[in-house]
Each structure stands twice: as C-alpha cells, then as structure tokens.
Amino acid sequence: MGCDIITVSTDTEFVHLAWRKSEKELAKVHYPMAADPTGNVSRLFGVYDENTGLALRGTFIINPEGVLVNSEVNFYNLGRNIDESMRKFKANVYMSRKTSEVCPSKWKDEGDKTLTPSEALVGAVHEALQN
Amino acid sequence: MSETVKLGQKVPEIELTTYEPTTNKFGSFKLSDQVDQKRWTVLFFYPADFTFV
C-alpha cells in the first residue's frame, strides 16, 4: 500500500528550496514540499489563517479513492506527535482492508485488539476489550 | 470563499507546485494522480519555512 507525504505551506517553491538547502535539520527530508502562496488549498482544508496568511499545523489523510478520512489541526504553538499521526494512518489503512472492524483508542498497530460493531457488542464493549 | 472539505467527503482536485528534494527540481502535485495510482496521501500543513516545525 503506497503512501506519499506532501508538506504544504504558503511559502513559494523557491523558499522551500532555499530552506531545505540551508537548514541542516532538513537534510533527510525527501518528500515533496508544496507551495500554496494563494492559500487556496489551505482554505480548502480550513487551516488558512486570514489574519497572518499562514497555514495552521494540519495533518490530513486522504485514501486511495480521494476521500478525506482523517484530520488533525494544531494551533501555532503545539507541535504534532508523529507517533499519533502514524497510529491514525496505520489504523485507516487497516480499517480500509477490514471494513467491519473499528480501532479503539488504545489500538496502535496491526494485531492489536479491534472491535466489530454488532448487536452483540451493544453494552458489552468493556468485556470485548478484555479478551 | 470556498467550502472546506469535511471528513468522509471526496477531496476536490488539488494542484500544487512543489520543490522536490530528491531531484533538486521543481515539480507538481496533483491529487487525481494519487487516485489514478491508488496511493494514500498525507498532507502536512505548517505555518512557514525558516521557522521551527
């Protein structure tokens, strides 16, 4: 299952190039860095701040059918937890294969306990999570 | 102003110019190419270059 990460800010591609080349922390960055100077794509995802012209810290997962399946937006002052982003991505890939299952809050990776909603699960989530 | 896309909705076509670190060239990203190639996409927005992602 292929996945592509694209970073997006309202900087131009020229600034992306300059930043990537000057900041040693970015030496290992290999994903495409997209330019959204009009803010139109940032607006589409609701992360454009009209007061500053900047995009908030949004992470959006789009499935192979082009449907938005997960979103997370942090304000300027809170970084994202990459483990949580990975958990959300893995869970969405898993659930796209096992469409009758859902991933509870403690699900981390393949093999962890999932739930299969049904009549039998109503009022019995506690027991289902124990097994 | 344009509508925002909601969870569970198909994302409208997106086209963006990119800088491609692997080739050191400018390129482009089209969401419809991802759909054609059956690939997952993660869009990672951040406020600005030369700041502290």
Image (cartoon, grey):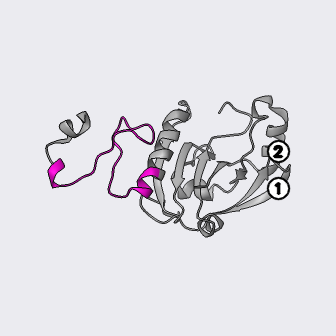
Q: Amino acid at mark 2?
A: Leu
- Whether B50 is among the magenta residues is no
- Whether A100 is among the magenta residues is yes
Work out which quarter of the rendered image holds the N terminus of chain A and state it. Answer: bottom right
Label annotation for residue B26: 1
Residue B50 figure quarter:
top right
Does dot 1 land on a helix, a strand or a loop?
strand
Q: Is residue A97 left or right of residue A28?
A: left
Q: Position of residue B26 (x, y in %)?
A: 82, 55
Q: Amino acid at mark 1?
A: Phe
Work out which quarter of the rendered image holds the C terminus of chain A and state it. Answer: top left
Q: Which residues are magenta?
A: A94-121
The Cα atoms of the two marked residues, 1 and 2, are separated by 9 Å
Question: Which residue carries the number 2 mark?
Answer: A17
Residue A18 figure quarter:
top right
**Closest to the observer, A53 or A17:** A17
